[in-house]
Image (cartoon, rainbow, N blue to C red):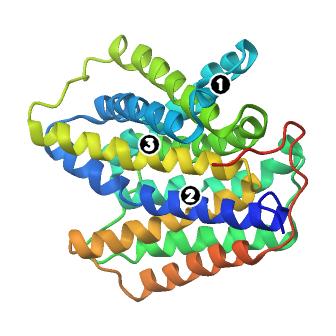
Amino acid sequence: MTSRSPARQRSLGYGEALLAAVLWGSSGIFSVHLFAYGVPPQSLALLRPAIGVVLLGLVVAAVHGRRGLRAPPRALAVLLLGGGSVVGLFQLAYQMSIDAIGVPSTVALVYLAPPIVVAASGPLLGEWPTRRRAVLAAVTLGGVWLTVLGADAVTPTFGGAGVAWGVLAGASYAGYTLFGRYATPRFGSGATVLYSTIGACAWLFVALVFLSDDFVLPTSSGAWALLAVFALVTVAAAQFIFFDALGRIEASRASITSAAEPVVAAVLATLLLSQGLGLTGWLGVALVVAGVVGVGADRRAALPPVGEPPGGL
């Protein structure tokens, strides 16, 4: 079995998507602490990817060399405009939702993404999911909601603009998963994640600096240090790994696997914030684990999108 065999590629991609979910599981805790430092969500939505893209460029260059930074003009246009739009929209909607309704409610709404990806990957990418894949998406979604609702000392809040931002975060998360699956086999994982993130920073700069009065910089060295670690863990590392996974496995498999994120978030909240899980929450964790393990064990792979063979790390 060669390193490029479908089974090996599928296993590696699944592992990468799972690792990205683990890293993303820390996002809510970072955001809450930075809000406490006085960094508003609009500023965090831009500063996190802006710092992350510098680190990301170093990661791409280290892993892929200078060739990983190259992209033809057509690819640059697609990545900067298309990828930048969906990634930037997610960054803004996610932070705005956390600020309005909190981490638990935001997580619940963001993970509307896997069913959207499962439904859209067939007509958009030619990756028609099996009935089993659709059931696993539903099981995972139910598990995420039970995990959120079963957190002790945390009361999820749903209402008004916060729900709108949360739903938008879920839809845009689905959008950039689908986009990443389209672009990565064609342009390479390094170029796709790097230029999509650069495009997101440009989009957010225009949207926030010129249209918002709430953009402020951190005022302490502790806040800057925390922000740098946040960008390193959840952008430079997690996004790079997740986009590489999208060059190896179908969008629906990657999206369902990424639902491990709220399980990690719940465990971190238990350990760091004394926000333990009740029986309902642990049932939700079990369902998420079942869905993630189930999609990892699913040997059936959909047809890949037409384009160059997926590239790997």
Horizontal and vertical percent position of residue 293: 65, 78
Is residue 133 at all visible to an observer of this figure? Answer: yes
Horizontal and vertical percent position of residue 228: 27, 40
Q: Tell me which residue sits at (51%, 33%) in the image.
A: 61
In the picture, the quarter occupied by the N terminus is bottom right
Any mark on residue 111, and which?
2
The answer for how far apart the CA atoms under marks 3 and 2 are is: 19 Å
Horizontal and vertical percent position of residue 73: 71, 12
Question: In the rendered view, does 227 fall on the left or right side of 166?
Answer: left
Q: Tell me which residue sits at (31%, 34%) in the image.
A: 44
Q: Can you tell which quarter of the image residue 96 is in?
A: top left
Compared with residue 9, is residue 219 higher up or lower down, i.e. above or below? above
The answer for how far apart the CA atoms under marks 3 and 1 are is: 16 Å
Compared with residue 12, is residue 216 higher up or lower down, i.e. above or below? above
Any mark on residue 310, and which?
none
Q: Amino acid at mark 3?
A: Val
Disc 3: CA contacts within 10 A as few (<14), some (14-19) or many (>=20): many
State the residue lying farthest toward the left: 220
Compared with residue 146, is residue 232 higher up or lower down, i.e. above or below? above
Check whether the beta carbons of the residues at disc 3 and disc 1 lie within 8 A of each other. Answer: no
Q: Tell me which residue sits at (57%, 33%) in the image.
A: 65
Any mark on residue 235, and which?
3
Check whether the beta carbons of the residues at disc 3 and disc 2 lie within 8 A of each other. Answer: no
Q: Nearer the viewer, residue 155 or 30?
A: 30
List the residue tagged with mark 1: 79
